[in-house]
Amino acid sequence: MKPKSLFRELARIVGKEGVLWRPEDLMLYEYDALSSRRQPQAVAFPCTTEHVVQIVRLAARLALPVVARGAGTGLSGGSVATEGGILLGFSRMKQILEIDLENQRARVQPGVVNLDLSLAVADGGYYYAPDPSSQKACTIGGNVAENSGGPHTLAYGVTTNHVLGLVVVLPDGQVIHTGARHWDSPGYDLTGVFVGSEGTLGIVTEVIVRLCRKPEAVKTLLAIYDQVADATRTVAAITARGITPAALEMMDGFTLRAVEEATHAGYPMDCAAVLLIEMEGLSEAVEEHAEEAEAVCRENRAREVRRAKSSEERDLLWKGRKNAFGALGRISPSYYVQDGVIPRTRLPEMLEFIGGIEKKYGLHIGNIFHAGDGNLHPLILYDARDAEQSARVLQAAKEIIGRCVEMGGSITGEHGVGFEKTDLMPLIFSDDDLDLMRRIKSLFNPQGRFNPGKLLPTGKMCGELRVERAAGGVV
Amino acid sequence: MKPKSLFRELARIVGKEGVLWRPEDLMLYEYDALSSRRQPQAVAFPCTTEHVVQIVRLAARLALPVVARGAGTGLSGGSVATEGGILLGFSRMKQILEIDLENQRARVQPGVVNLDLSLAVADGGYYYAPDPSSQKACTIGGNVAENSGGPHTLAYGVTTNHVLGLVVVLPDGQVIHTGARHWDSPGYDLTGVFVGSEGTLGIVTEVIVRLCRKPEAVKTLLAIYDQVADATRTVAAITARGITPAALEMMDGFTLRAVEEATHAGYPMDCAAVLLIEMEGLSEAVEEHAEEAEAVCRENRAREVRRAKSSEERDLLWKGRKNAFGALGRISPSYYVQDGVIPRTRLPEMLEFIGGIEKKYGLHIGNIFHAGDGNLHPLILYDARDAEQSARVLQAAKEIIGRCVEMGGSITGEHGVGFEKTDLMPLIFSDDDLDLMRRIKSLFNPQGRFNPGKLLPTGKMCGELRVERAAGGVV
């Protein structure tokens, strides 16, 4: 079908103002950090579940792929239309439909921005716990697709631990309701299957989430180290004491200097690593835990432990962490973010390993970790215009992820599989496991038109990381 | 196949000592509180995943149903072989295979008794959070099948929130591994599908669970009321203050008197209701919350608030609660336990409604609630030998569950659907939703030989509660 005809068909459903089809408009939708260099035929912006149903039926009639996209802040290519088709944008479905503070529930449309939900319930003393670093932009719908985590995952769990129910449109236009407002819903837990399914099973058009009570007190510490190994050892030492910080983040000195130059958050310019440690809860408990954590830091040779003395100082410390990727983008034409996970007790070993990889491949690697979770984000700096260097980057990234798996970890901690890591799935799943996942996919999405080419290996690849980067482009 | 031949086939797999086949032995397995009055052809006790695979293959060859059974403490008939076949008992698979305190994980066989897991990690300062009232008997495998909750669900969530991965045998003998040791596993969340699937999708032979750190301090309060409505109002008032007790249980005066007569826990004999409120955490925080909760109780006209002054006093208060069903069994030839859930803010209304039902049907109903969760357990006392009275009980139970659904609740809070509530599923799920669940079931269990007749409506019933009780029998 010609672009103009598809435009007319879609406009009949969502109005002319709800469709993009000109190549210059579509360019915005060809990447989500990972560039696919493939555009959708059109982008449609539904306002209601019924709009989604009609678009999905139209796509079925035309045998076109349908790809749902939140804010496009994913980092594994999940929301790009690698095989063309209709991209669904949710920027017109951003209503908070219902807030029920007494029962700690909210019902929202998928386009609601993560942070906006927390802001909307803040006056009542509540917030929505999963907080990806992109929370100012990313949407609840996107979070559901990717089962997103964030710095506070350590204490509160990932998206699936906070989603109670969904409204989902299946590829034949059928609308189903999963879950309930309660902890335990009878029947099969279909909510859990959809959360993290990366848009390959259905299109989520409504989400019931659990709200958490805001903590009475928050204390944020910055522990500064002259040796990386001292910082990594501190991580396991803190949790071994039975303290679960709300967040326990690590950045190495290299990353820190880039962050400081970009944000002027007051980070030291000469250290080897810092830990950002946050305690939440009742005032006395928080104070006690903060003192204990500080003591553990010093026992593990932190040269200094700073405490944010005001919420402004706290915000500044977090600003540095939440903008770290962008800060590294300032000093390198491109970077590759790896996302792996290991048992947190093996962090010291892993950082040593990554140091070895840096030397072996002659690359700079910045290390940003959700350390408490054992979730690594090594950022490999390079220039995508240099083919030889790009190849080295992919090889280095592959070695790091391989080591994660060997250590009893996994190929992704939170960014998802997308189209980037489909070929790594056999590292952690047997043929039988993958076959079962394929059967699940066939059940919901028999023609494979919902987000084709994502999540599961196609079997055609040879185990190489397939990654393309827009030359010179960073997030 | 003749019983003796089946015995020989099974004995070849698990040894003679691992099979029961004589009718007098099989009688023990025909109920789990709900009586099916149907026996399996044989009970087999596997020791390994490989044993389960071989038994499942044998069953496939003989076209026999396979029903997995933990301790048989379920209350909806999930673990009885209503259509005969081979019942799998897991009392020989009760090893804790691995304890990893540093990463707060344990890997266990399905026959491990819930409480035994907590005891095994207690010295290290940890425990397994989901605690059904039957925790001294019920197994982790059974908990996984039923997605069990318990008094502490309010603060810590149900089983699915604490299970990270599974080993599962499918009906064709295939063994799959789901999930991982991490929060967020890539691919479809098959762990979530199996948890709560009541044995209809696969047989779990290994479970990776999350361990929780034991709280530093625990305070247990007993608030005593002269009016039921004051107690129910207190529940919402406590959580509205932003206090989440670890447990918030309610018993009415009628139940309480039966409990006191059975356990001599020191409950008052003349009150209308009590709340059992437990706070956990750091000492100071717990003290502060306990004081605040006590104040809320008094504001809502509690006539007395007692505090357990020692762990012995605490155990005594819980002993009363955890043995409440048994205590009611002492004063009635039979009882029917309903299991429903409503938003906790509607508890006062619901208790009034149940009072009306008591009058309307001329029945005694004891009320035991996981009140903080809105999870109701009205116990209807009757005599199963009286057919007319039994019919009234079913009608009353049906009205209560219907009202739960009308209030925005659900047909089961934690006991599962089993064979008891399959026909109630259409109250909360549309035909499309149920159809999708049937397709999920067909995918894993195409011949329907795993736990047939459970969880999903067969479509042949007329919406009546199908409940049979052993005459004169209680749990």
Image (spheres, coloured by chain):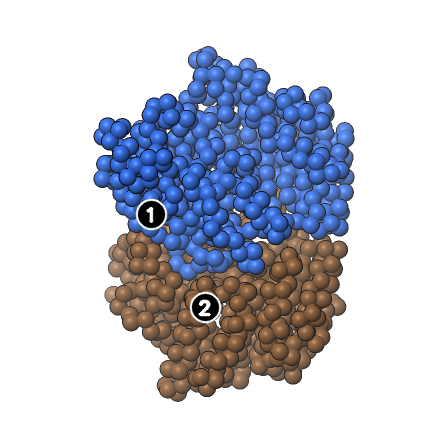
Chain colours: A brown, B blue
- The amino acid pointed to by label 2 is Cys
- The amino acid pointed to by label 1 is Glu
Measured along the vertical axis of the image, is residue B411 above or below residue A430?
Answer: above
Of all chains, the one bearing label 1 is B
Residue B424, visible in the rendered structure = no
Residue B115, visible in the rendered structure = yes
Label 2, label 1: how far apart the Cα atoms are: 29 Å
Residue pointed to by mark 2: A404
Residue A463, percent from left and from top: 32, 71
Residue B315, percent from left and from top: 67, 35
Q: Residue at x 56, y 47 (%)?
A: B120
**Tag 1: Cα neighbours inside 10 Å, few (<14), some, or many (≥20)?**
some
Q: Circle 1 — which element?
A: helix
Q: Quadrant of residue A222?
A: bottom right
Q: Nearer the viewer, residue B195 or A118?
A: B195
Q: Is residue A245 left or right of residue B471?
A: right
Measured along the vertical axis of the image, is residue A469 above or below residue B438?
Answer: below
Q: Residue at x 64, y 63 (%)?
A: A238
Residue pointed to by mark 1: B50
**Tag 2: Cα neighbours inside 10 Å, few (<14), some, or many (≥20)?**
many
Q: Is residue A64 left or right of residue B236?
A: left
Q: Residue at x 34, y 71 (%)?
A: A39
Judged by depth in the image, the label closer to the viewer, 2 or 1, is 1
Q: Disc number at residue B277?
A: none
Q: Circle 2 — which element?
A: helix
Q: Quadrant of residue A42?
A: bottom left
Residue A313, percent from left and from top: 71, 70
Q: Residue at x 54, y 69 (%)?
A: A347
Residue A475, percent from left and from top: 48, 75
Q: Nearer the viewer, residue B473 or B198?
A: B473
Q: Are marks 2 and 1 in contact (CB under 8 Å)?
A: no
Q: Quadrant of residue B141?
A: top left
